[in-house]
Amino acid sequence: MNKIRLSKTGLLLNIFFLSATLHAEISLPSIFGDHMVLQQETNAKIWGKSSPGKTVKIVSSWDDKEYSTRADSKGNWDIKILTPSAGGPYDLTISDGSVLVLKDILIGEVWLCSGQSNMEMPMKGFRNQPVAGSTEAISSSENNLIRLITVKKDKSFQRLDDFSGEWKECIPENVSGFSATAYFYGKKLQQDLGVPVGLICSSWGGTRIEPWFSKEDLQNFDWIDFPEKTKEDFSKQLPAVLFNAMINPIVGYSIRGVIWYQGETNRWDPAHYDELLPAFVRDWRDEWDIGEFPFYYAQIAPYDYKKIEINSAFLREAQLKASKLIPNSGMACLMDCGERDCIHPANKEAAGNRLAYLALARTYGKGGFECESPVLDKMIIDGGIVKLTFLNAKNGLTSYGKELNNFMIAGSNKHFYPAKAVITKEGISLSSPSVSKPVAVRYAFDDFVIGDLFNTGGLPASSFRTDDW
């Protein structure tokens, strides 16, 4: 008798679940939800699941226009809707017979923020590692025109369609655990542009750049291995596994551009990084298929890695080289922000603001301020004197009254000696009593230094060298 009852119960449950499947309510991935920001003045793609063959309709409250499509044989659908200029809040009504309403939607500027731990580092800081000024910044952070979403850490050998996370309002409780670099970036944009800003943070500390690539693009590099593994405890460093889980579910969401803070974990292989970074940007741009969207990135800050066989200045050099190879890009230099014994500089506001200066000038067309750090233009050798000129220093250079201590010069014997550096009307003049016939110059080319050369806009020069030794 009990067996008969269990059998009937099982049959009823099967019928129930079958019925639920046949009449499945419309569902959306986590990137869509209440409080989200949609990119202004674009055809924003919305996608989700419904029952196969169902007609899906979307009505936007900003113009009451109706959009419709039909779900495919697997229930997948997508619709592009025209977004207005910045404003809100609005609603989106999505229906396939059942109705789903997304509320408190803003239209504005959307940026994807990614990288490793210096992007991940939250406003409240890491354990025993603070963010400078965080208490004041968090306590005063409430702003209904900024919205935040963090992608939960995950990895996968296959491309995933969704992630764990949700859009949140910009209030102290939510800002505290959000990326500090991304928050300061978004705060500066919102303040200066006066429009809503949406920040999507997808980052994971200690990761190389390779796992953030799609597998397809990485196959162009013959030194990269693709292990065939299926076990659950695989490394987060394997190629494409973070793209699959933490970026692919976002691909297609309309964004203005990307900010990126990563490189520390690739410092062992700088020779490949200046190839990988431009390829990485091409890869993401190909995935989004919306053209050469802006890509701004932070150069890694000086830090004492205590590994004398690898000087992290070579990785900074690779990042500097890449800035000349990537269209519609820019690099924020942090040479004055490093800390000898902490790889996570406390001054995250400098990182966020300097990335924002690039966006404000290059993406949004604002002017009257410096947005780029000084970059070596020419070296002229005049007897025992080396003369340097710089780009991005229209109003000249400064050390803020301090002695310049980070310049070295060498002769043909390749031995570098400290140089006497003087700021001139044209740039920098260098000399050393130990080098009568100089041939090469290095500036701040070491793991840990405090940058002391700036343009008059207060942006520090990157470490650099003129030799290839």
Image (cartoon, rainbow, N blue to C red):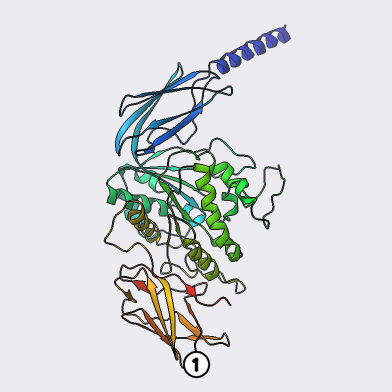
Residue 410's place in the image compared with 68, above or below, is: below
Residue 230's place in the image compared with 130, above or below, is: above
Q: Position of residue 246 (x, y in %)?
A: 54, 43
Residue behind mark 1: 434
Residue 40 found in image quarter: top left
Q: Nearer the viewer, residue 400 or 330?
A: 330
Q: Position of residue 155 (x, y in %)?
A: 60, 44
Q: Nearer the viewer, residue 387 or 36?
A: 387
Q: Residue at x 40, y 45 (%)?
A: 256
Q: Residue at x 62, y 46 (%)?
A: 216
Q: Residue at x 52, y 54 (%)?
A: 116
Q: Position of residue 271 (x, y in %)?
A: 60, 65
Mark 1 packing: few (<14 Cα in 10 Å), some, or many (20+)?
some
Quadrant of the rendering where the C terminus is positioned: bottom right
Q: Position of residue 222 (x, y in %)?
A: 68, 56
Residue 273 at least partly seen: yes
Q: How many marks?
A: 1
Q: Secondary structure at mark 1?
A: loop
Residue 385 found in image quarter: bottom left
